[in-house]
Amino acid sequence: MAMTKCKECGTDISTKADACPKCGAKQVRTSGCAKFALGAIIFFVLVSILGQCSRTDSPSRAVSASPPATPASSVSGPSQPAAPSAPIPGSQWVYDQQTDPMKGGETLFAMVQSTNTVNFDFPYQGAQHATLTLRTHPRHGKDVILKIERGQFLCRSYEDCNVLVRFDENEPVTFSGVGASDNSSEMVFLRNYSRFVAGMLKAKRVRMSAEVYQEGSPVFEFDVSDFSDAKYKGGQ
């Protein structure tokens, strides 16, 4: 027979007794189902406590771990576009050479495009540049050529015209010009090559103006700085 203690006086009594035979205190018996339920509750409480301990430990491990490396971009800020590089002095000039099919000598060219554009009326409408060319030809000698893309210079191959030239901020000077021998209207050949080149070599900017059919005398500006005589003669 299973025995237990009286909760009031401590006397050993049977687990099946309803009251203590000594003090008469009623005894509370715990059924098997109640014991099972109590054990289950205790088990879940223990599991819950262990889970809390586990979650409490996790942050401490995360704090002690080394942080991931920070990308350089987040430290230095967003990348900035590279600053445009300064143009190479004299890069506006184009040098070339061609072999003359008749005499076999080399024709040398130095060309620069106008920094401004002009717009003519129909049928030559649309923005266009002019080109200033220095040419040394084995048969025709040395020339200064002003050429437009579209339009008609009022300068004939058999009759001189005037071309106004201004070196930097000096007073404009007048050069005589002549049209192309094939009567093409887009080119004017200036006379006195040496005089023009002497003025150009002392200047950084040259303005040129010649009369164009129904367009007046448009002005073209050229950046002539850093001209290279060595590249001109070498055609490079």
Image (cartoon, rainbow, N blue to C red):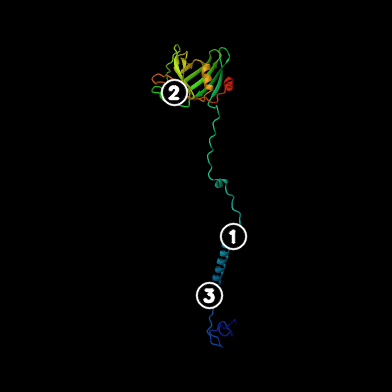
Q: Position of residue 232 (x, y in %)?
A: 57, 21
CB under 8 Å between discs 1 and 3: no
Which numbered marker is on residue 27?
A: none
Q: What element carries label 3?
A: helix
N-term mark: 2 or 3: 3
The type of residue carrying mark 2 is Val
**Residue that carries the numbered disc 1 in the rendered image:** 60
N-term mark: 1 or 3: 3
Q: Where is residue 214 in the image (x, y as percent from the top left)?
A: 38, 20
Residue at image point 56% right, 64% down: 52
Placement of 80 over or under 48, stated as above or below: above
**Residue that carries the numbered disc 3 in the rendered image:** 34
Q: Is mark 2 on a helix, strand or loop?
A: strand
Nearer to me, 102 or 211: 211
For the C terminus, which image quadrant?
top right
* Circle 2 residues within 10 Å: few <14, some 14–19, many ≥20: some
CB under 8 Å between discs 2 and 3: no
Q: Is mark 1 on a helix, strand or loop?
A: helix
CB under 8 Å between discs 1 and 2: no
Residue at image point 53% right, 75% down: 34
Q: How far apart are marks 1 and 2 (CA)?
A: 79 Å
Nearer to us: label 1 or label 3: 1
Q: How far apart are marks 1 and 3 (CA)?
A: 40 Å
N-term mark: 1 or 2: 1
